[in-house]
Image (cartoon, rainbow, N blue to C red):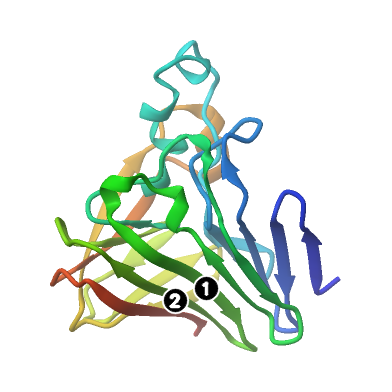
Amino acid sequence: PEIVEYPETQFYYIKNKNDFFLATKGGHNNESHNHNDVGTFSLYYKQTPVFVDAGVGTYTRQTFGAERYSIWTMRSNYHNLPSVNGQEQKFGKEFRASTIDFNKKTKAIAIDISKAYSAEANIQKWVRSYHLKDNELIVKDDFSLSKTEDNNKIHFMLWGNIDISAKGKVMIEVNGVKMELLYNEKLFEPDMETIELPDTRLSNVWGKQIYRLTLTAKEKALKSSYEDRIRTL
């Protein structure tokens, strides 16, 4: 089906006739087997994951102890999410999506993720929205802050072959699928981190490494709107 919705757990799945598949979630950060990932998304094209959730590595004592959220796979800034004023999302049921607007006809969803961050993020409003069109996904962050203490960052988790050399454009090629991410070069500076995967539970899925693309805002802003477009080539 083109739309699958689980309103109690706030999981949403959207596909179109051009082989795009979008998965996104609201929820809260104290779910069973929780990751701090309210508002994140995964994007598939032609049944190939392109913008990904890394998953979880081999279970250890750390996975189930007080150090759980020091593991990178559990942290929001290693999901397809923003870091706000230098802050990532926090653990706890109170850190949650507050409102969700899901338009099934236009295949657009807006998730207020402001309450998924602590007070130190100084968020008044942060709405992450996704609009799946025929040949592209539009990812938008509409926000206002009470104070600016650090530059905002938008993170994307990727695998395959990634090229960030062109201004305003990230080229992605994985398993024969080619896509590009278009961002505002006047607002953002791109950086890419290589994450080695010695844990076979992860490397058996993704290979030896995946990547975290970070778009860092060049200026601090109390109020703004960021828009990124992901489309096929």
For the view shown, which residue lies furthest in the top direction? 61
Residue 147: image location, x then y, percent: 19, 61
Residue 74: image location, x then y, percent: 46, 36
Density class for disc 1 (Cα within 10 Å; few <14, some 14-19, many ≥20) is: many
Residue tagged 1: 129
* Observer-nearest of 145 and 139: 145
Quarter of the image with the N terminus is bottom right
Residue 227 as seen in the image, left or right of residue 86: right
Residue at (19% x, 72% y) in the render: 221
**Are the residues flagged by discs 2 and 1 in contact, CB closer than 8 Å?**
yes
Residue at (50% x, 47% y) in the render: 37
Residue tagged 2: 140
Residue 114: image location, x then y, percent: 43, 58
Q: Element under label 1?
A: strand
Residue at (42% x, 78% y) in the render: 180
Residue at (62% x, 30% y) in the render: 33
Residue 11 quadrant: bottom right
Q: Is residue 220 visible?
A: yes
Under mark 1, the amino acid is Ser
Quick check: 15 above or below 208? below
* Observer-nearest of 219 and 124: 124
As measured in the structure, the alpha-carbon distance from the residue carrying label 2 to the one carrying label 1 is: 5 Å
Q: Element under label 2?
A: strand
Density class for disc 2 (Cα within 10 Å; few <14, some 14-19, many ≥20) is: some
Residue 105 as seen in the image, left or right of residue 72: right
Under mark 2, the amino acid is Lys
Residue 153: image location, x then y, percent: 27, 60
Q: Is residue 182 visible?
A: no
Residue 84 as seen in the image, left or right of residue 65: left
